[in-house]
Image (cartoon, rainbow, N blue to C red):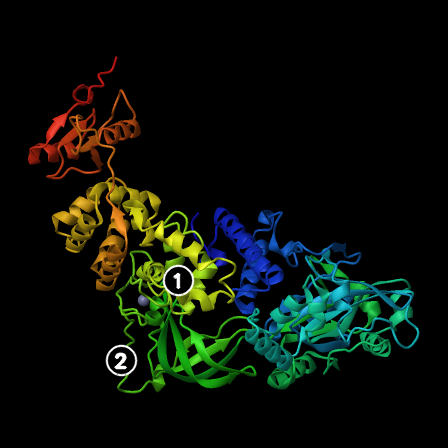
Amino acid sequence: MQDFSQVPIEDLDADQAAEELARLAGVIAHHDALYYQNDAPEISDGDYDALRRRNEAIEQAFPDLVRADSPSHRVGAAPAGGFAKVAHRVPMLSLGNAFDGDDVAEFLARIGRFLGLETAPAVLAEPKIDGLSCAIHYHGGELVQAATRGDGAVGEDITANVRTIADVPNRLTGEGWPEHLEVRGEVYMRRADFQALNERQEASGGKVFANPRNAAAGSLRQLDPSITAQRPLHFFGYAWGEISVPQQDALGSTLMDARQCLVSWGFSINEPARLCHSLDELMAYYDHIQSERPDLPFDIDGVVYKVDSIELIERLGFVSRAPRWAIAHKFPAEQAETILEAITIQVGRTGSLTPVANLQPVTVGGVVVSRATLHNEDEIARKDIREGDHVVIQRAGDVIPQVVSVRTDLRPENSVPYAFPDRCPECGSHAVREDGEVVRRCTGGLICPAQAVERLKHFVSRNAMDIDGLGDKQVKFFFEEGLIKKPGDIFRLAGGDKDSLTPLRNRPGWGKLSAENLFAAIEARRQVPLDRFIYALGIRHIGRENARLLAKNYGSLEAMTAALSRAADPESEAYSDLMAIDGIGPAVADSLVAFFAEAHNREVLADLSAQIQIEPFEAPAQEDSPVAGKTVVFTGKLEALSRDEAKAQAESLGAKVAGSVSKKTDFLVAGPGAGSKATKAADLGVTVLDEAAWLEMIGKTPT
Ligand SMILES: [Zn+2]
């Protein structure tokens, strides 16, 4: 599918618009699931809103193309498994968004037009808490059920969890409440509580949350309510759903009245709220709250405007998925300027090098920020970000702060462009970037401390060395204890004194496994077939199939090491031999060459060779076969056999099948349509056979 994500909407034709709507539906559904079900957003709220706005704008321009699964029809994601589902008898809709004063003016104008009013009605303005919407039902004043919003139509039953929240009355106080009452509001966590929770979580090895909203969501959706009870959750009531009597009878004629009712029945409400009578008053409130934002004890992401009169609310009703009488006015992403002191490189567990900006600490939206993501090498080059620069950073709610731009006007005179390292900062190995990849990776897999545990896990895994009793947990444990740092250490461990492990027996991760059993399992793998050994090295792009091809082609580890070291020169015969192996392409070849070029890796191989016996690849050669040990290339169309059958047959007779013709080729079997390979074979003096001659030679004359 072509990418139209950057095409302005007015330039889209109908086909392109349809594709773009399809793309957006998928992307938005993906982010919804991350946000609502996993509490782990990947993009900022601002970026998410931009996606939804683009989707809505395209739908407006192409109303015929609105999809059945349009994100505009959905509020959030369907509930995750684990909780009973609760249908909301009055749907829980989300609000439309305003991003600037014009949007707010249009909101008021639309209300005026709809109601035929000359002046705007009174509008209640409240802070918009960044939490989790929740509906709580009371019957006869008793809390009977609580549910998350879910997708707006169906949520999750979290009654037991909500009962543990101190701000939520289990029994309504005061008087005048209707027989049945559904109070809606936001479950949230205060910033200070969030920080303390994260400290506790970190100390106990639990999950650390990205922000208060995620912490609230994660705490509320615990299957065990006793865990929720330990979390410092709060609740604000701000709306209602089902009520057993007419709204005005229960709650009064305005939202301001309703707020007082909620307070008298035992709920907290969000402050500071204000009743406004004009666009100017709304904008003044917005500015005021934005300036207060850093000092509020909880995160907010904007303000909400709601028509105050319940009579007018009922007349205005709903449009699409949002009420006509309310709108959320979002704050822009928060930015600040600071100095980028240094760029450091983090090495991931698969060897990827990620640049991080270390900043002079600065407060952004009430949070002190000292690090920001720089994404990758290209991003740094594109924005020309340098150490010592004044930079503008942005923190958008949920995501890691990022560097937006550089104040080049404030750049020091001696500034130099940032040179991305070509060596791994953890182990000093070469860091390479493959064609078409944005990420640079460390090639020192086996010795790189950042990657060691992952590589060791792979080394001992079932399809590799297959060492029973050395599971993921044990590998991590031995690594952390300093007993296994590199693969050869595994065999030194077993060769050592068994009693040296005695003190470990009662430690976590060691379990019931006795030293004797583990040593026996390790001893049993001191002999290993070459192809398994190659696979165990965990070289990028070398899976089991490629490992087998290499083992078959080179025969022994010594021959392979020698050949691949020589192959560092792309002009060398060793390199063309490598490329001639049928199934080995340039990416695989480059990865192998990079691995064997690394002195650290050759040391690891030498160390292992001293510890274990690597069995040469056993070709199923038949001594009396006329093609045993010969290199054969097939080209053109074969008639008696398929290409795969012919290859398998040749291999079963001990021949090596190559993908291209070189000086080492013994026979080229050329069917009709053979092209350049036949010409090259003729040039090199390679014997060319047709299919019949080949079959005759191997004694398989077709009948
Ligand atoms: Zn490294």
| Location of mark 2 (residue) | 416
Vertical position of residue 87 compared to residue 336: above or below: above
Q: Residue furthest top?
A: 703
Pinpoint residue 177: horizontal percent, then vertical percent: 90, 71
Q: Position of residue 504 (x, y in %)?
A: 46, 67
Mark closer to the chain start, 2 or 1: 2
**Which residue occupies the foreground of this view, 164 or 527?**
527
**Which residue is denoted by mark 1 in the rendering?**
498
Q: Nearer the viewer, mark 2 or mark 1?
A: 1
Which residue type does callout 1 highlight?
Lys
- Ligand 1 within 8 Å of the CB at mark 1: no
Mark 2 falls on what kind of element?
loop
Query: Seen in the image, is 428 located left or right of residue 410?
Result: left
Q: Amino acid at mark 2?
A: Val
Within 10 Å of disc 2 (Cα), the crowding (few <14, some 14-19, many 20+) is: few
Q: Taking 84 as reference, is 637 left or right?
A: left
Q: Percent x, y for residue 697?
A: 16, 21
In-front residue for pair 462/82: 462
